[in-house]
Amino acid sequence: MYIVNIGTYPPKQCGIATFSMDLRRSLVQNGNSVSILSVSDETHEYVYPPEVIFNIRQHHKSDYLKAAQLINASPLVDLVIIQHEYGIYGGQDGERIMDLVKLLRRPYVLVTHTVLPQPSKYQKQILNYLCHRAAGIVCMTHRSANLLADLYEAPREVTSVIAHGVPVFPVQTSASLKERFHFEEREIISTFGLIGPGKGLELGIKAMQEVCREFPRAHYLILGQTHPMLKKQEGERYRDMLEKMVDDLGLGQHISFVNRFLSDQELGDYLYLTDIYLSPYPNRDQAVSGTLAFAMGCGRAIVSTSYSYALEVLGQGRGLIAGNPDPKELAALILSILKDTDLKRRLQTAALSKGKSWTWPNVGKEYTRFFRRVIDNTLLNEEKGVSYAKL
C-alpha cells in the first residue's frame, strides 16, 4: 500500500510527531510505502527528512487546499492517515483540517489522540464531521471508542481499537544501569515527557516529601525538556517554579531534572533503571499517554492517578491507581511498592505481559491489516456506488 500520513513530524518535538514517525517506520517494516504531509507551527523553521513531501503551515488555509490537491493528483495513493488532535491544525479548534477533508478524493483513516467527554459545541462538530467522512477510525482505548460512538455518533462498523505503539527497548538490568548513572542503592521513581502545566509534576514532587521520610535514599527523576511551544511563549517559568518548589520543600538531594529531549535509547536506559514509574496526570479525561505505554513496554511497576487511559490499561493488577490526584495517596502507593518486593515483581510482570504486545512492529501489523480492510471495503462500496464520504 502507498499511504500518506498527515500530522506533525520530527524534528518538531511533540507526542504526535514522534507517533507519526514511529507509525511510519512500523508500516514500512510491514511492506508499505509511506510519505508524510507535515504540519508545522509559525514560530519554528524545520528541516524535514526526505519522506516529507509537503509542509502544511498551520494557519495557512491555502496549504490545506494544496495538500488535498497533491493527494488527489497522485494515482498511487491508496490511503490517507489523518492524525487528529485539536491543537495541531489551524483555525478555531483545528477547523482547518476540515478544509482539506472537503476536497479529499482518497479514503482516509482518522487516528484519534484526544476524545473529549465534554467537548465544546464546535469541538464536537469538528470531530463528528471528520468521523462521518472517514473510511476508518482508530482509537487507542475501548473507552475512547465507546465515547466516540456514543457522544460523537461515530460509526462503530469502521472503528478499530489499536494500542499506542512502544519502541523495542533492549532489556537491561536495573543494577547495572544504576551503577552507570551513579544511583547505586537508591530507589528510583521517574516521570518522563515534555514538561508543562497539566502533567502533574507538582503532585510527584509533593509526594516525595512523604516517601523520603521512610526511604531517605529514594530519588525522583523528572525526565524531559519543557514543551517547545510553552518555552517559546513564557521561557522556563514553569520549570523554574518546579525547581523552586523542590528547594522550598528541602528535596534538592532527592529530585533531579534531566532537561533535554531524550532519544529512545536514553528513555530505555532511564526506564530500566526505574523502580517505580509515576504517571501523575491530574486531568481525569486524559485519553492516551504514550509515556505510560512506554513504561508498560519496559515492564515497570507503575503508580498513576485515575485518568481515563490509566484506568483502562492498568486494570487487572498491571499498576496501582490513586483514587484522587493527591500527593499523599500517590506517596502511600509508592511506599507500598518500596516496602514489598513481591508486589513490585507482580506489578512488573503484569505490566510487561500487556506492554510487550504493544511494540511498534506488532502495532504496525495491526494497522496494516486494518488499512487493508478499509481499502477493500472502500473498493467494494465504490462498486456498489456508495461513497466512503458519508456527509
Image: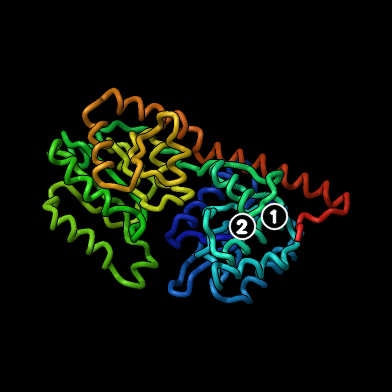
What is the x, y in percent for residue 154?
66, 51
128 or 354: nearer the viewer: 128
Contact between marks 1 and 2 (CB within 8 A): the answer is yes
- Residue at 63% across / 71% down in the picture? 64
Q: Nearer the viewer, mark 1 or mark 2?
A: 1
Tag 2: amino acid: Ile
The picture quadrant where one finds residue 260 is bottom left
Q: Would residue 182 be visible to someone looking at this image?
A: no
The residue under label 1 is 134
Q: Would residue 352 be visible to someone looking at this image?
A: yes
Tag 1: amino acid: Ala
How many numbered callouts? Answer: 2
CA distance for labels 1 and 2: 9 Å
Figure check: 340 above or below 140: above
Q: Is residue 255 left or right of residue 116?
A: left
What is the x, y in percent for residue 173?
29, 31
233 or 124: nearer the viewer: 124
What is the x, y in percent for residue 79?
70, 53
The residue under label 2 is 82
Q: Is residue 190 left or right of residue 77?
A: left
Which disc is residue 193 wearing? none
- Residue at 28% across / 38% down in the picture? 274
102 or 79: nearer the viewer: 102
